Amino acid sequence: MAGARPRTLSAGLVPVAVGTAVAVGEGSATAWWRAAVALVVAMALQVGVNFSNDYSDGVRGIDDSTRIGPRRLVGSGLVEARRVKWAALVALAVAAAAGVVLAAAAGWELLAVGVVCLVVGWLYTGGPKPYGYMGLGEVFVFVFFGLVATAGTAYALLERLDWFAVLCGVPVGLWAVALLTANNLRDIVGDAAAGKRTLPVRLGERRTRLMYMAVLEASYAVALAASFGGRAAAAAVVGAPFAVSAVRRVLRGASGPELIPVLGATAKVQLVSGLAMAAGIAVT
């Protein structure tokens, strides 16, 4: 359970909820089991990426028992590396199997998207040149846990690309970016020492703190803009109080262990704002 990182699973839940809400709001009569299978895909992919990151960082010696925050399985020596690797592969296999079922029902083009998701999920910190170490992690979560997951869920239910779903995927992706940014800001010292060039390491603390604020502001701006077409995506502002609290802590210079509550608040932003937006879209 520790290696699966349950607190990060909102990154899989929210885009599926929003994508499903878009389809429901457009009167889709598609069987609800497709939404359930899409949720399995998203959750299993998130868990697989978490285990993959734990394994890849651990075998590279980047995470150890001195890191700030929850202990990693491989880096702290709690679990053998090969067992964590197999956990990652099993989770990704579950995502792949569920994806095949969804593609068989909604269109085989989804299979190509799924393959790309699996590959980039593994290469985030795995492979010879992990792009997560090159400052591209935020791009990955924005695209795949925002645009692709949201629009892909709507596609599975509507069997067509819905541009409103793509638009709604923007704030969803930005909330995922905010969560990763807070996490990487917390680890900035250790990552820099280990040669892990995350975006916060490249930007430095001051600009990363400003980026965190800007990302959250942009998420609500896009949600408000998406409401101009008559769909109540602006309901996302229900989660804004959590965002205000988190931004205040970040701008006041919270660092290291002080950023752990910020991570919790950011996860609440993602979950509360995302589900509120989904509810608003579904009923309008």
Image: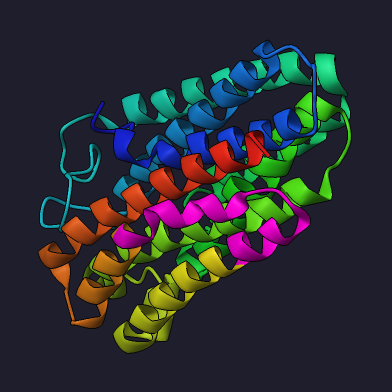
217 lies left or right of 155: left
178 lies left or right of 227: left
Q: Which residues are magenta?
A: 222-241
Q: Quadrant of residue 244?
A: bottom left
Query: Would you place residue 214 above or below residue 97 in this image?
Result: below
The image's colour scheme reads rainbow
179 and 201: which one is in front? 179
Percent position (x, y) of residue 64? Answer: 18, 52
User: In the rendered image, is residue 136 in sight?
Assistant: no
Q: Quadrant of residue 55?
A: top left
- How many marks can you see? 0
Q: Main secondary structure of the magenta part?
A: helix
Q: Which residue is depicted at the point 86% across and 41% down?
A: 161
219 lies left or right of 248: right
Percent position (x, y) of residue 240? Answer: 38, 60
54 and 4: which one is in front? 4
